[in-house]
Amino acid sequence: MLKASITKKRREFTVDVALELDKGNSLGLFGASGTGKSTVLACIAGIEQPDEGHVELNGFRFFPPALALHKRPVGYLTQEPGLFPHLRVSENISFGIPKNLAQDKEHARWIETLRTRLQLGPLWNAPASLISGGQARRVGLARMLARKPELVLLDEPFAGLDRDLVRELIDDLVLWRRTLGFSMIAVDHQAEVLRRLCPEQAIVLEEGKVVQRGNWNDLYGAPATPLLRSLLAPL
Amino acid sequence: MSLNHKRVARIGAALFALGLLYPFTALFAHVGPWQWSGDVRGHALASVRVSLLLTSCAMAIILAIGTPVALYITRCSVRERLVWQAILLVPILLPPLALGILLTLAFGPYGSLGSHLEHYGIVMTNSATAFILTQVYVGMGYYVLGAVAALDAVPVMLQKQAALLGLSPAKVFWRVTLPLARLGLAVALTLAWVRAIGEFGAVVVTAYYPSGMPVQLWVNLQSFGLPAVMPLLVAFLAVALPLPWLVHVLAQRHRHA
């Protein structure tokens, strides 16, 4: 179970969010751009430090004190997948995987699944610096999932990708979450994407504060603020 | 820019380049038959050996000490970083002769440290140790400042991603930071190399013996005149220039790729 309470001062406002997420469940963080959603994810991942609060995953304390990044069983994917440009696609995906695990047959099957489902075969030996943005996003997703993290954090990972690819990636993620049992928090400013990715529950942020939490039907049925109503309205 | 202006600018740039390279025409100057007799040759070859061997030792020390220092500086606060930059600039900005005198006084037999070292058999004037120490002082600032810039250019987010993928800080450095900064580090090291191998002012005070190439050039000039200088000068250019030049060209190509 993830338990997090995060207070982090930003220039315009203070992000102040508390959340709990059962093991294997998913949570969508929704809101307009610049409302502190990414800050919450970055604080849970450890990329940023909260000013106050605590973060704990399955009884394992992340903060305070700040646990070293390499000790957190967390996968974190952003719009910029952060591939290592000096390595090939395959080397990026196997990056950080211990040798004994890399030689395990079940792990090899899992990597093959990722390679097939994410259509990485033709790119496998390409230098990571020479692939397109959409391809890099798929490689980033594979790299993150290769280690089978306990918690997956997605910060608008599908922005700028075409709809068919987004749909496929979401379906894969939902399936893998169920089969692997990882928890997942995703951030997006497109409600439909987030609802499909994290169907169980959502938290809505405005200026760093939680204005509504619950399931998606509640959000659509009775949006708590005019801004949320306009964000959920069809185009 | 019109075609005419472009042509004028190009001619101007070409003249500038010719002006920069013009001093090399002196290699073909009529200074009389080049002198490469046994006496001159022996000292000249010894100076090439001294310069190459001892400068390599100095570079190894600079690399081993300067890289962790540079890494530390990249992680400092802005204020601490400014202090470090000010400290590193001191040996760079110091007139070489003044640096040589300071080093001799500080490490030589007149200082307490120097007399202690001498007690243990470590002679800090006119010795290989003095030569290496001087070159380390001369080149360290150039390397560390260049290395800081190279390490700064590696995106922090990539290093954090590597850590989140399970790599300890040391492994992140070896597998991500170092490979991505290696060209910049090489450029920084070549700057230190060029500066150290060509150093005359400080070395002539601290380590007249064993004579490196710059000191031997000066000795040849004083003792035998230009004909004895020219062969060693060619050797000096051949040893000091090509490698740093190539590294810089490669770095520029990589930057524009």
Image (tube, coloured by chain):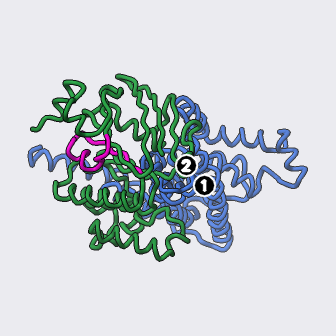
Q: Is residue B233 left or right of residue B253?
A: right
Inspect the image, locate mark 2, and give the three-letter code of the amino acid beneath it: Tyr
Chain B display color? blue
Residue A143 location, x and y as percent?
39, 61
Residue at coordinates 40% horizontally, 57% vertically from top-left? A144
Residue B67 location, x and y as percent?
58, 51
The chain letter for the residue carrying disc 2 is B
Closest to the observer: B196 or A121? A121
Indicate whether B250 appears above or below B120. Answer: below
Q: Which mark is residue A107?
A: none
Residue at coordinates 52% horizontally, 47% vertically from top-left? A58
Closest to the observer: A213 or B257? A213
Q: CA distance from mark 2 to mark 1?
A: 8 Å
Is residue A198 shown in magenta?
yes
Do labels 2 and 1 touch, CB within 8 Å? Answer: yes
Q: Which mark is residue B143?
A: 2
Residue B140 location, x and y as percent?
60, 47
Q: How many marks?
A: 2
Tag 2, which secondary structure? helix
Residue carrying label 1: B63
Inspect the image, locate mark 1, and give the three-letter code of the amino acid beneath it: Leu
Q: Quadrant of residue B93?
A: top right
Chain A display color? green
Q: From where the camera sits, is residue A171 visible?
A: yes
Q: Which residues are the magenta region?
A: A183-201
The chain letter for the residue carrying disc 1 is B
Q: Is residue A60 left or right of residue B16?
A: right
Is residue A186 shown in magenta?
yes
Indicate whether B118 appears above or below A206. Answer: below
